[in-house]
Amino acid sequence: MTSTEGKLQVVRQLHDIAKQPQGHDVITQDPSLLSGLVLFLDVQQHETSVVCASLEVLELLADKPSCRPIMNQQLGMKESLQHICSSRDSAAQASAKSIFQLLYKPDQKSRAPGSGLKDTYNTTRSTNNSNTRKGLLLGGCQQKIQDYNSAD
C-alpha cells in the first residue's frame, strides 16, 4: 500500500463517519481528526485525490450549521481553503470555495433591506442552485479519486 492509498483510506473512513447522523460531532469534537483533514488540504504535500477526498468530508461537515463555528476556528482551515481557491485545480478549487463560503461568509440575503420579510423566492432558488452545484463539485472530485484508483 502506498502512502497515498493509506491517506485515501483514512479519509474514506472519515467520510463514512461524516455521513452518519452523529458522525459530524465525532469528527468536529476530536481535534486530531479535524486537524488531520486540514493537513491533507496541502496541495504541495498531497495528491489531488487526497485533497479532493478531504474536501468532500469537510463539505459534509460544513453543511451542518452546528459544525461551522468549530471548523471556523480550526487552525489552518481558512488559509488552506484560500490556497486551494487560488490553485489551478478546478474541482478542488470549486469545492474549497463552497466550504469557504459556508464557514467565513455566512448568507446575508435572508432578509430584504427595510421590509422585515424573508425573501423566500431567492432563498429557495439559491438552495436549489447550491444543491446542483454541490453535486457537480463532488462529481469532479470523485472523478479524480476514481482516476487515481484506476491508475493502479
Image (cartoon, rainbow, N blue to C red):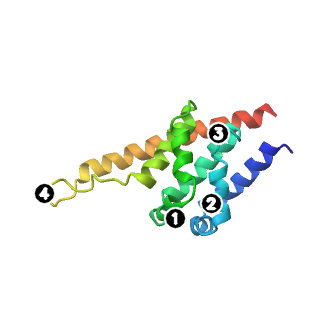
Does the CB distance between marks 2 and 1 fall below 8 Å?
yes
Cα separation, mark 2 vs mark 4, equals 40 Å
Cα separation, mark 3 vs mark 4, equals 45 Å
Kindly state the secondary structure of the residue where label 1 is placed. Answer: helix
Q: Which quadrant of the figure contains the C terminus?
A: top right
Report crowding for label 3: few under 14, some 14 to 19, many 20 or more residues within 10 A (C-alpha).
some
Residue that badge 1 annotates: 70
Label 3 or label 4, whichever lies nearer to me, is: 3
The one of 55 and 104 positioned closer to us in this rendering: 104
Residue that badge 3 annotates: 43
Does the CB distance between marks 2 and 4 fall below 8 Å?
no
Kindly state the secondary structure of the residue where label 3 is placed. Answer: loop
Residue that badge 4 annotates: 115
Q: Name which residue lies at 62% across and 69% down.
A: 26
Kindly state the secondary structure of the residue where label 2 is placed. Answer: helix
Residue that badge 2 annotates: 34
Q: In the image, 119: left or right of 127?
A: left
Report crowding for label 2: few under 14, some 14 to 19, many 20 or more residues within 10 A (C-alpha).
many
Cα separation, mark 4 vs mark 1, equals 33 Å
Instruction: Name the kind of residue labelled 1 in the image.
Output: Ile
Q: At which x and y percent is residue 68?
A: 48, 61
Cα separation, mark 3 vs mark 2, equals 17 Å
